[in-house]
């Protein structure tokens, strides 16, 4: 009765060889992972909650304005904390936007017309009048009246 096919013993032997192979491969893989952690272990898993929180904090810190005057007023308002902690004896003090950005008082300021153009400038604080005035220069799109380019870099 030779019907030229696999018999029951052949099928059981084939399944045994497959299971034995799978067992050996999994043991070797586990040992390899234990001795040599995989490359994927070196790549930190992205914590999406932290990314979302960072985006939310950045959005809260952003200054939204529809006019340059409104933008200048909001920058002046955010600079009050800086002047309270960094005040000198001068009657008129100034701080550059760059310094406010570096010390996390304000985010990077962009032009209202073109979000690709950074604005430069400074905030002046007149102690006698308790007045904060922001001077902005956003490329060629906008410049505050009375803007002094030397104060953009040099602080009093």
Image (cartoon, rainbow, N blue to C red):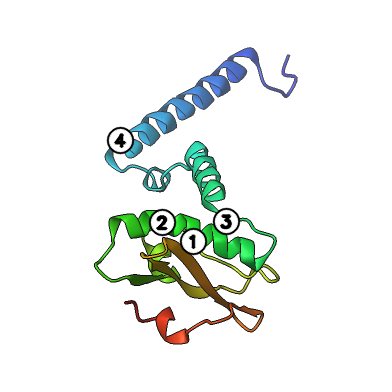
Identify the mark nearer the N-term, 4 or 1: 4
| 151 horizontally vs 5: left or right | left
The C terminus - image quarter: bottom left
CA neighbours of label 1 inside 10 A, class few (<14), some (14 to 19), many (20+): many
Identify the mark nearer the N-term, 3 or 1: 3
Residues marked 1 and 2 touching at CB (< 8 Å): yes
Mark-to-mark CA distance, 2 and 3: 15 Å
Identify the mark nearer the N-term, 4 or 3: 4
Residue at x 55%, y 43% (from the top left corner): 56
The residue wearing badge 4 is 34
Give the farthest residue toward the front. 128
Mark-to-mark CA distance, 4 and 1: 57 Å
Label of residue 76 in the image: 1
Label of residue 80 in the image: 2
**Observer-nearest of 84 and 60:** 84
CA neighbours of label 4 inside 10 A, class few (<14), some (14 to 19), many (20+): few
Q: Foreground mark, 2 or 3?
A: 2
Q: Foreground mark, 3 or 1?
A: 1
Identify the mark nearer the N-term, 2 or 3: 3
| 133 horizontally vs 71: left or right | left
Q: Secondary structure at mark 4?
A: helix
Residue at x 38%, y 70% (from the top left corner): 95
Q: Secondary structure at mark 1?
A: helix
Quarter holding residue 69: bottom right
């Amino acid at each position: 009765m030779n019907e030229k096919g696999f018999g029951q013993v052949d099928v059981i032997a084939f399944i045994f060889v497959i299971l034995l192979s799978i067992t050996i491969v999994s043991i070797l893989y586990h040992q390899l992972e234990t001795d040599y952690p995989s490359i994927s272990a070196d790549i930190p898993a992205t914590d999406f909650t932290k990314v979302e929180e960072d985006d939310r904090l950045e959005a809260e810190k952003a200054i939204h304005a529809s006019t340059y005057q409104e933008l200048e007023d909001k920058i002046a308002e955010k600079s009050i904390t800086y002047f309270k902690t960094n005040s000198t004896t001068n009657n008129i003090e100034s701080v550059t936007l760059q310094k406010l950005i570096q010390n996390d008082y304000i985010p990077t300021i962009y032009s209202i017309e073109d979000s690709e153009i950074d604005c430069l400038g400074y905030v002046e604080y007149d102690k006698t009048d308790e007045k904060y005035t922001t001077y902005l220069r956003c490329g060629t799109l906008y410049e505050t009246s009375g803007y002094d380019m030397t104060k953009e870099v040099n602080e009093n």
